[in-house]
Every structure is written in C-alpha cells, then in structure tokens.
Image (cartoon, rainbow, N blue to C red):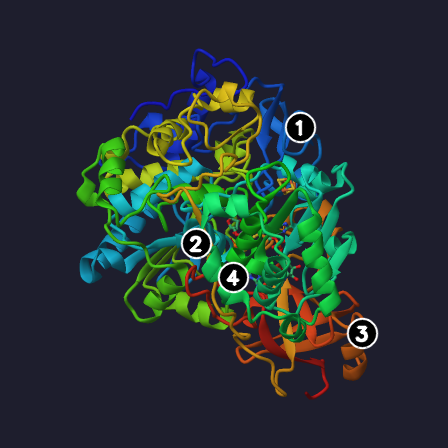
C-alpha cells in the first residue's frame, strides 16, 4: 500500500511526506504494538500522514500557522480559524470570512479543541475478556483479527445479513462512503442505518415524495431576506445559535412566528408564539391552508405551472374549520386567522422546521403540510422563501447522500438496477456485490436483534445506549448480541461500556474530510492535532478492516479521504447533488465551501445559491406534489394514571447530545445544569407540592427517573420537558415511529410526576 497523496488545503505540499526523525520514533513505538499480519500491515500504512494517529505533527501543515476548518458539532457548519504552534492546534477563533457564520461561533465551537484531551479518550483497542467480562487493552492486530474472526463466524453460521452496522451524521462524508461501501460491498452486510434516522429521516421522505429528491432548498441568506419567518418545532436560539444570529441580522423587521408547545428561548424573542398542543401541527397547518383557499390567497400561476394535486388537497382540507382547529390545537380562532393573514401578507415567507416536526409518529405528513403552504403561496425558489428543513448534526446531509444506508451512494436507489450498475462501474466493482434491496431501518435492526436474526452489530460514532428510544428495551436488546463492536472517541460512552470490542477513533480536528451543512454546503475539516495514543482516524480503521477482512482490493483507489472525494464527484454525475464542478479540497478551501449542486466550475458559481429558482422540481414531470393525510391522535394519550405529556429535546447551547464531548470542557460545564432537570408549570408544581430544585420522580409505562424540578411558565400545564442530554431521559420514551420515515417519536409520551418520597 502506498502513502496517500498529500492534499494540503491551505499550504503548499512539502516535498517529503514524513519527517525522517519522526519516522524512526514512530516506527519504534508502532512496531511494538502492531505485529505483521500475513505481510498485510506495511510500514507505509502505519506512517500514513492522514492519521494513524502515531505521527506527532500533521505533516502537511507548517508548524506555526493559522489554518481553517468547519466546526464538527451542529449542521450550521461554521467556519473556524485554527491556530497552530509546533504543528499542533492551540487555539481557535471564528472565521470572519466564512459565508456561514461571518465571524461568529457558539460556545461549543469555541471550545471544540478543549474536549479532545479528555482522560477518557480511547487510546487503545479494548477487548472483552470472556472470563472476567471486562474490557482489556489489546493491540490493533488482535483487535482487528477478532473483529474479522467474530463477524465472519457469525455470518458463516447465520448468513451475511446477521451482522449489521449503525453509523452517524457526524463522520466526514468520505468516511461514510468508505464505511458504507466496506460494510455492504466488502463485508456482505445487507443492513445498516444510522443516527440520522433519529433526526432527519422524516425530512428525507417528505422531500423525496414532494420534490422527487431529498433537497433542502435554501441558503442561509434567506434568514436575512425573509419578511415572515415561520419556525415550526425549531428552537434556533439553543440548537442553531448562529442561524439565529442570521435572523437577527435581517434588516426587514421580519415577523418571527414560532409554533412550539413550549415558550422556548426562540419563542421569547419571536413576534408571535403559538403554544400549540403537542402533535396538533398538522391540523393547524391544514386549517391555515383552508383559510388561504377560502380567501383565494393562492398563487395560482405557480401552483398551475409547477405542482400537482392542489384540487385533491383543497377537497381534503375542507373539514378543517376554525372551530375544529381551536379544539385540537388549543390556539384561539382569531390567532389562527391572524397567522393565515400574516402568511398571505408576507412577500417573502420562509417556513423552517426541525425536530418538533420530524420526531413524530406523523412527521412526514406534518412536514408535507408545511411544504404544501409554501407551494400554494408560491413561497419557494425566491430569496427569503422556502419549505426548509434544518438539519441537526454537522454532516447529517452527508449521511443522507453517502452513508449507503437508506440510499445507495450519491442519492441513488438500491432497488434500481441502472443505479447499481452505475455505482459499480464508478467504483470498479462487480455490480452483484451491491444489494438489490433496501436496508432495514434502525428500529428494524433493533427488532432483528430481538428476534435473533441479527447477532453482530458494529456501532460507529453514535451512542445508541443513551440516545435510542425506550432505553430499558434498548439495553436489553444490545445485551443479546453475540458480538458488539463500538468505534468511538471515548471508551466511557454508555454504548462503549457494553461493547465486546472497542475501537478508539480520532475525532474532529484529528483527521480530514468534508461535511455538508444545512444549506447543502460542502466544508472542509483538517487534521490539526494528533490523536491520542494509538487512536486512529475512522478512515484508517476502515482501511485496516478492509485489509484484515481481505476485501481491500475493492477499495484500492481510496488511499486518502480526498481520493474518496474524487469518487464521490463521479457518483454525483447526473444527480441533483452533482459536485463535479469542485476540483479538489484546495478549491473547497479557497472558495469557503461550495453548495451542491455544482455541476460546472464552482469558482464561477457565486458563494451561495438556492434551489428551484426555475420552478422545476425533481419528479419526472418537473412538478412538486401536494401530499396529505388525516391527522392521528396522540400515540400515547394521557390518562388519569399518566396525566402529563413528556416533551424532550435540546436543553442549552452548551450541551451536545449524549454529552460525550461537551461534558469534557470546563467552560461549557459552567454553562449548563449539572444534573438532570425537568421543566414543570407553576400550576402543576403547586398541585404536586413541588418547588424548584426539589427532586421529583417521573414515570412512564416503561421506566422512571428522578430529576430536579425547574418550575417555569415556559411549559404549559400538564406538560413537562426534560432535555435529551442526560442518560436517564430515554428510559421514559415510547418506541413509536412514523410509518413512512421510521423516525422515532421522541417528543410525546404520557408520564406521571410526583415529589420524591411522596407516594403518587
Ligand atoms: N446545543 C445543541 N445544539 C444542537 C444539538 C444539541 O444536542 N445541542 N443537536 C443538533 C441536532 S442533531 C439536531 S437534530 C437539532 C435539533 O434542533 P431542534 O429541533 O430545534 O431542537 P429540539 O429541542 O429537539 O426540538 C425543537 C422544539 O420542538 C418542540 N416540539 C416538541 N413537540 C412539538 C410539537 O408537537 N409541535 C411543535 N411545533 N413543536 C414541538 C420542542 O418543544 C422543542 O422546543 O439541534 C442540533 N443542534
Ligand atoms: N429523548 C430524545 N432522544 C433523542 C433526541 C431527542 O430530541 N429526544 N434527539 C435524537 C437526535 S436528533 C439525534 S441526532 C441523536 C443523537 O444521538 P447520538 O448520535 O447517540 O449522540 P452523540 O452524543 O452525538 O453520539 C455520537 C458519538 O460519536 C462519538 N464521536 C464523535 N466524533 C467521532 C468520530 O469522529 N469518530 C467516532 N468513531 N466517534 C465519534 C461521540 O463520542 C459519541 O459517543 O439523539 C436522538 N435522541
Ligand atoms: S453553531 Fe454549530 S457549527 Fe456553529 S460553532 Fe456552534 S456548534 Fe459549531
Ligand atoms: Mo439530530
């Protein structure tokens, strides 16, 4: 195996790839823990500058310099300047030239480097000792050999589909492409999904059905150009603070309308807040559509030329009267009328949605109810408009296009023979290696384990034993596996603790690749730090696995992430997400990121673009579709035994998901409550005899937790909100899914509440 080509994004490549003194030092330590395996592990492979984590300096960057990279937390995709000393990052500042964040960053971004040195970083592979049941350090050779032996043995006994993988929206796109290809084309797996199912599946399906391709249409400039901004189930101030800053820069005194059962930080700053009953959005949105129709506030020219299905939709929404809407949504009739009027009066109305919509047992149709409003008012394809799903993780969009889970690489379809032929041709592999069926979804993989059909699971860059719905069942399911491999930056995660084999991974800042942000912008991340101990970049772990598995010849072309990027370009040809106009990483860096599509020279395309300016959508007839369905009642209605509705989501701007990263920063820790808390309305608190900071007990039919009470008007009576960042939260949630997207409905289940020590 040869060294990967050097791809210095900001600086000229050095002539020698690895410093000779470094080479000696590295080999000395390296050979002491990695043995030659059938001549496969070569010295070059170990010394690869892309990041076997052993080299001290990132060889391609000058020792004292400032370079750039995009942030690795949320999907905003802010640009950062990273300052190096002796070849290692020592500090960072937000990039003032980057078109996304214009010099701003949130606390997580500012603290991004400081979570990399934590004592619980994985520095060596760990293998469970069969006798003691404890994880013990092993070298990479033993780790990779047991990975291969155990998974192969399971597949031989139970068939190839008995091993599955769960990936993520937080790896670079190139690593996702490698992983998905390795698992499905190299290792013969049929089933793989990822945490994007928990997050974006609803938006994916809603867009595919309505537009013909999974394509969020906006550019962030639209936040600044709207005169009416409608946020549905989206708490920008906390979850996307820099997008919110863009709203704050809007010079048109926009109407900011928030639909959220809670008075969130975003709702507090809005001009109109609708504290809608949980999961009644569909009714409200259909009623607004009905009002628009009744008043003939429809952009008929746009509708007639660019859409299908309006007449069926008009007929369907007739029964959605103001009376019905008031009863179901809890919003007074005059306010609903006012909302419809604002949407009509706005010249540039943009609709944005996030998890309050996606995480629902009826998410797809709710998202489409938003899309319908944008279509019928012609609010799409123009500045400041759009039916805009905001993504969550730094590379949620990358996983939607390249994780090889729900869709075949590049937004293709596993079930279409021409797509399989095309992808096989580009990869130079036999098309028979590409499965002709779709993967099981995350929940189906979990069910598969429960039924004993899936016996081996490889979890990469996600923390299932904290974030998946209904944890009591989840832990039981994971414990039934014959072999669980967890590949993570930290060995302390709830899932890693359950692993039979733990593989230590380099994280953001310790490797390179691209992320695709919410506005479809490819941004570059770089290796600015050495991974600790013997941790390796996921890219290199995948390469090693392909060698040990014996399928590395399939991926010979992919010696570096940028090689994969070049393949991704080819895969994108003819797709709506075409990126053939981006020459290489250097160009991406120079242009401050590039949005897809970029089918022609990206340097000529301008720094930002929105979709559908010509009114043409991706269905064969070029038209968008109105899609709708009768709303369903709450999946778990309240009762006298469980009288509260539990809502969950993001707590503060300083906490990230399962807290494996953000809990390692001393600065961030000062910015959020240490222990789990539950927001409770003062009226309920009085009835329960609870004051703030009392410990309360919250129970659902599935489990119980204790939390500190936080008494606040922000939640409505008989509702309670608990952030997702604490490991207990998902003990309560109910494993219910949207029928089309299979996304978990994390935001509503029935619970009871009482003061600790007091019988309920
Ligand atoms: N600080 C921080 N930022 C993050 C993340 C993080 O962990 N921490 N995670 C990132 C990720 S992956 C994601 S997906 C995004 C999520 O970003 P958001 O979706 O904005 O965050 P959530 O708090 O999950 O949910 C948003 C709102 O939905 C509301 N909601 C609940 N039920 C309903 C309903 O029935 N109708 C309506 N209209 N609203 C409802 C909740 O009250 C909540 O305020 O954030 C990203 N950004
Ligand atoms: N109740 C409730 N539950 C929810 C939600 C909710 O709103 N309510 N939201 C859901 C949503 S939208 C999401 S996106 C999920 C998120 O759920 P998870 O994906 O489980 O959350 P993270 O903490 O981001 O987990 C990422 C893991 O990857 C590791 N990691 C980070 N970088 C790297 C890397 O480069 N390589 C490797 N190998 N590992 C790395 C981290 O240490 C961490 O363990 O949670 C979902 N769960
Ligand atoms: S808003 Fe998101 S991308 Fe920007 S600095 Fe914060 S976490 Fe990073
Ligand atoms: Mo998410």
Residue that mark 2 sits on: 205
**What is the x, y in percent for residue 320?**
58, 69
Does residue 641 lie above or below 715 as drawn? Answer: below
The N terminus is located in which quarter?
Answer: top left
Residue that mark 4 sits on: 314
Q: Earlier in the sequence, mark 3 or mark 4?
A: 4
How dense is the environment of label 1, judged by Cα within 10 Å: few (below 14), some, or many (20 and up)? many
Tell me the mark number nearer the camera, choosing from 3 and 4.
4
Give the CA distance from mark 1 to mark 2: 34 Å
In-image side of 234 versus 450 (left or right): right
Does residue 188 lie above or below 632 as drawn? Answer: above
Does residue 180 lie above or below 19 as drawn? Answer: below
Which of 276/635 is in front? 276
Residue that mark 3 sits on: 682
Q: At x 20% / y 41%, what residue is drawn? A: 431
Check if mark 2's residue and mark 3's residue have beta carbons within 8 Å.
no
Give the CA distance from mark 2 to mark 3: 39 Å
Which of 605/411 is in front? 605
Q: Earlier in the sequence, mark 1 or mark 3?
A: 1
């Amino acid at each position: 195996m040869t060294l990967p080509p050097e791809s210095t994004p900001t600086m000229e490549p050095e002539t020698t790839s690895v410093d000779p003194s470094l080479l000696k030092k590295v080999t000395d330590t390296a050979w002491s823990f990695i043995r030659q395996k059938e001549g496969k592990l070569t010295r070059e492979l170990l010394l690869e500058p892309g990041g076997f984590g052993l080299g001290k300096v990132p060889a391609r960057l000058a020792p004292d310099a400032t370079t750039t990279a995009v942030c690795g937390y949320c999907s905003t995709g802010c640009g950062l300047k990273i300052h190096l000393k002796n070849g290692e990052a020592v500090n960072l500042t937000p990039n003032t030239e980057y078109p996304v964040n214009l010099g701003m960053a949130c606390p997580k971004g500012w603290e991004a480097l400081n979570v990399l040195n934590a004592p619980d970083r994985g520095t060596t592979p760990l293998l469970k000792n069969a006798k003691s049941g404890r994880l013990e350090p092993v070298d990479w050779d033993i780790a990779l050999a047991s990975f291969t032996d155990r998974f192969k043995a399971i597949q031989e006994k139970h068939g190839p589909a008995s091993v599955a993988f769960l990936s993520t929206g937080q790896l670079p796109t190139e690593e996702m492409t490698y992983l998905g290809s390795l698992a499905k084309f190299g290792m013969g797996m049929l089933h793989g999904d990822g945490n994007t199912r928990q997050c974006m599946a609803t938006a994916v399906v809603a867009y595919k059905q309505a537009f013909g391709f999974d394509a969020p249409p906006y550019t962030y400039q639209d936040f600044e150009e709207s005169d009416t901004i409608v946020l549905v189930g989206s708490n920008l101030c906390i979850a996307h603070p820099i997008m919110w800053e863009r709203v704050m820069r809007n010079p048109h005194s926009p109407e900011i309308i928030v639909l959220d059962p809670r008075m969130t930080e975003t709702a507090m700053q809005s001009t109109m807040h609708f504290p809608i009953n949980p999961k009644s959005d569909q009714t409200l949105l259909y009623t607004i559509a009905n009002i628009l129709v009744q008043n003939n506030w429809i952009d008929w020219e746009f509708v007639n030329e660019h859409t299908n299905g309006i007449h069926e939709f008009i007929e369907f929404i007739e029964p959605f009267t103001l009376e019905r809407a008031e009863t179901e949504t809890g919003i007074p009739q005059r306010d609903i009328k006012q909302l419809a009027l604002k949407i009509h009066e706005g010249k540039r109305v943009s609709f944005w949605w996030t998890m309050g919509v996606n995480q629902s047992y009826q998410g797809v149709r709710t998202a489409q109810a938003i899309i319908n409003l944008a279509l019928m008012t012609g609010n799409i394809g123009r500045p400041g408009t759009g039916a805009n799903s905001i993504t969550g993780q730094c590379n949620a969009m990358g996983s939607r296009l390249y994780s090889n889970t729900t869709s075949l690489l590049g937004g293709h379809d596993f079930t279409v023979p021409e797509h399989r032929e095309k992808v096989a041709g580009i990869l130079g592999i036999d098309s028979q290696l590409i499965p002709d069926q779709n993967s099981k979804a995350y929940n189906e993989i979990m069910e598969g384990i429960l039924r004993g059909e899936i016996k081996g699971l490889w979890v990469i860059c996600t923390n299932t034993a904290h974030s998946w719905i209904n944890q009591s069942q989840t832990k039981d399911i994971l414990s039934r596996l014959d072999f669980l491999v967890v590949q993570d930056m930290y060995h302390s995660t709830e899932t890693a603790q359950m692993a039979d084999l733990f593989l230590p991974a380099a994280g953001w800042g310790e490797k390179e690749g691209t992320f695709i942000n919410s506005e479809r912008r490819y941004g570059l991340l770089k290796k600015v730090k050495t991974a600790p101990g013997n941790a390796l970049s996921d890219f290199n772990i995948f390469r090693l696995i392909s060698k040990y598995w014996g399928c590395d010849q399939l991926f010979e072309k992919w010696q570096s992430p940028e090689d994969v990027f070049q393949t991704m370009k080819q895969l994108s040809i003819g797709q709506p997400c075409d990126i053939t106009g981006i020459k290489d990483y250097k160009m991406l860096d120079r242009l401050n990121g590039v949005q897809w599509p970029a089918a022609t020279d990206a340097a000529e395309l301008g720094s930002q673009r929105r979709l559908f300016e010509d009114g043409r959508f991706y269905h064969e007839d070029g038209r968008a579709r109105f899609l709708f369905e009768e709303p369903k009642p709450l999946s778990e209605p309240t009762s006298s035994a469980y009288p509260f509705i539990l809502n969950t989501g993001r707590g503060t701007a300083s906490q990230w998901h399962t807290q494996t990263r953000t809990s390692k920063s001393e600065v961030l820790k000062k910015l959020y409550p240490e222990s789990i808390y539950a927001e409770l309305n003062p009226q309920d608190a009085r009835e329960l005899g609870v004051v703030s900071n009392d410990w309360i007990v919250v129970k659902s039919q599935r489990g119980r937790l204790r939390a500190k009470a936080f008494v606040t008007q922000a939640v409505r009576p008989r509702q309670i909100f608990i952030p997702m960042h604490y490991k207990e939260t998902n003990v309560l949630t109910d494993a219910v899914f949207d029928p089309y997207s299979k996304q978990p409905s994390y935001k509503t289940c029935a619970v009871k509440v009482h003061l600790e020590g007091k019988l309920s």
